[in-house]
């Protein structure tokens, strides 16, 4: 019998603490002064994480993280702007697609799923195409788990005077992001990732000097971040019905984040999780898809076992029966699956998960997780 919630070994939603869950048991009025105070506190705490009070504002938005990515492009990029997307995975391709759907010109530089995007390639392209106004990148491309070089991309954008939009959905609060060292126009994250809140709310850090020029650029009413910011500054309220329970859960999750020691402590825990996961899975024969030099400690992609008896759905269901939710692969040419290292878990849960995978292989009659090639 299942006596605890399933452990979510995914890139989000994540396993949350009891404290975070309990925070959602109270109902809130969206115009109430207590709720307005929570909104203000969360916004301040988010800016604290990136040391961004002097240079940026933060604008929360209802919906999943993709809502905020789309809102960022629609708000920050002028209608005649030209966005260059650095693509090494599924979420980069999503960014390119929504950019085009927002009516902005979009060019893509493609990289392999198992390599980082390149500042050298970016610079070469900017030298050949002066029409680019903005560069867009994913900090941690969780399609495979690659950690992309944010600082070097930021440096090139600064050198050429290009706006940088960063999808930091799966890196914010775990990997270092310091607005005093980086130059970016917008950086996007969400409640249900490394802050270990629940899903339902994104937030966008926008450079103050950039936001001042964004009025009227968005073609969307609901996702106009300029309007959302103006209204919040004036009233302290959200323009439209806020995700009240999500926000208060995030406030509680941030309190625990700060108690743990902030970003450095969270990165250390996730790194231990990742190392324990890779070590345990390799002992079972599994092979990580990425070289360790570019692997982010967020989610690990493994090659599927080469045994003909392997089917991901059966593998998934057997692991789930033992209390662990895995994630399917996101690659198109190679069969893989993914295992997350983030959430309110530590090495104990990771070791339990590896043991569950070992028992799952036994269930399926598979001797080893070794891939076909």
Image (tube, grey):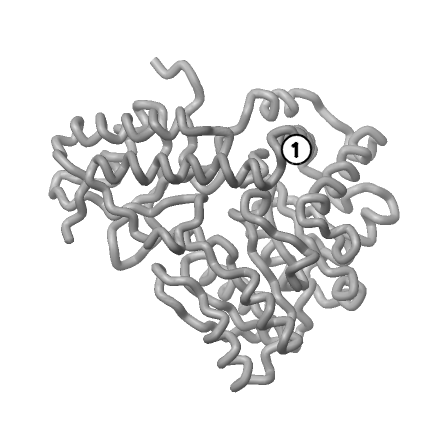
Q: Which residue: 41% across, 44% down?
A: 299
Q: In this view, does 351 lie to the left or right of 213?
A: left
Residue for badge 1: 258
User: Does residue 208 appear anywhere in the picture?
Assistant: yes
Mark 1 is surrounded, within 10 Å at the Cα level, by few (under 14), some (14 to 19) or many (20 or more) other residues, namely some
Viewer-closest of 365 and 30: 365
Q: Quadrant of residue 55?
A: bottom right
State left or right for residue 368 relative to residue 347: left
Q: Give how far across and how far down residue 2 sits, in percent.
A: 37, 16
Decide: is 366 above or below 156. above
Q: Where is residue 306 in the image (x, y as percent from the top left)?
A: 15, 46
Residue 37's spot in the image, x, y percent? 81, 34
The secondary structure type at the circle numbered 1 is helix
The foreground one among 322 and 175 is 175
Q: Where is residue 270 in the image (x, y as percent from the top left)?
A: 47, 38
Which of the two residues, 139 or 36, is positioned nearer the viewer here?
139
Q: Quadrant of the N terminus?
A: top left
Q: Residue at x 56, y 36 (%)?
A: 265
User: Is the residue 6 above or below the residue 192 in the image?
Assistant: above
**Point 52% across, 56% down: residue:** 139
Q: Is residue 200 visible?
A: no
The residue depicted at 67 percent of the width and 63 percent of the height is 185
């Amino acid at each position: 019998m299942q006596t605890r919630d399933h452990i979510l070994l995914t890139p989000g939603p994540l396993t949350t603490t009891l404290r975070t869950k309990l925070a959602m048991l109270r109902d809130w009025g969206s115009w109430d002064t207590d709720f307005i105070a929570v909104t203000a506190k969360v916004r301040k705490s988010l800016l604290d994480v990136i040391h961004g009070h002097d240079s940026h504002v933060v604008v929360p938005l209802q919906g999943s993280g993709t809502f905020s990515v789309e809102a960022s492009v629609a708000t920050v990029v002028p209608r005649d702007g030209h966005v260059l997307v650095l693509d090494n995975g599924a979420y980069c391709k999503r960014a390119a697609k929504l950019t085009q759907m927002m009516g902005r010109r979009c060019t893509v530089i493609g990289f392999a799923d198992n390599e980082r995007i390149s500042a050298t390639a970016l610079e070469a392209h900017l030298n050949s195409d002066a029409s680019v106004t903005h560069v867009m990148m994913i900090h941690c491309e969780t399609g495979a788990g690659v950690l992309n070089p944010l600082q070097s991309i930021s440096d090139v954008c600064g050198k050429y005077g290009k706006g940088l939009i960063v999808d930091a959905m799966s890196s914010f609060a775990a990997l270092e992001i310091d607005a005093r060292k980086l130059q970016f126009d917008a950086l996007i994250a969400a409640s249900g990732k490394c802050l270990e809140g629940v899903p339902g709310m994104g937030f966008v850090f926008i450079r103050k000097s950039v936001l001042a020029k964004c009025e009227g650029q968005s073609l969307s009413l609901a996702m106009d971040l300029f309007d959302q910011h103006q209204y919040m500054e004036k009233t302290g309220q959200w323009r439209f019905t806020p995700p009240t329970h999500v926000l208060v859960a995030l406030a509680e999750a941030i309190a625990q984040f700060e108690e743990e020691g902030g970003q450095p402590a969270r990165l250390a825990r996730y790194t231990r999780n990742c190392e324990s996961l890779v070590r345990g899975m390799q002992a079972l024969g599994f092979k990580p898809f990425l070289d360790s030099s570019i692997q982010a400690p967020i989610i690990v992609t493994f090659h599927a076992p080469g045994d003909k008896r392997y089917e991901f759905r059966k593998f998934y269901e057997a692991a789930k029966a033992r209390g662990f939710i895995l994630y399917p692969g996101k690659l198109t040419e190679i069969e893989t699956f993914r295992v997350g290292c983030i959430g309110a878990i530590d090495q104990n849960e990771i070791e339990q998960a590896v043991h569950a995978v070992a028992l799952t292989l036994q269930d399926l009659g598979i001797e080893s997780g070794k891939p076909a090639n």
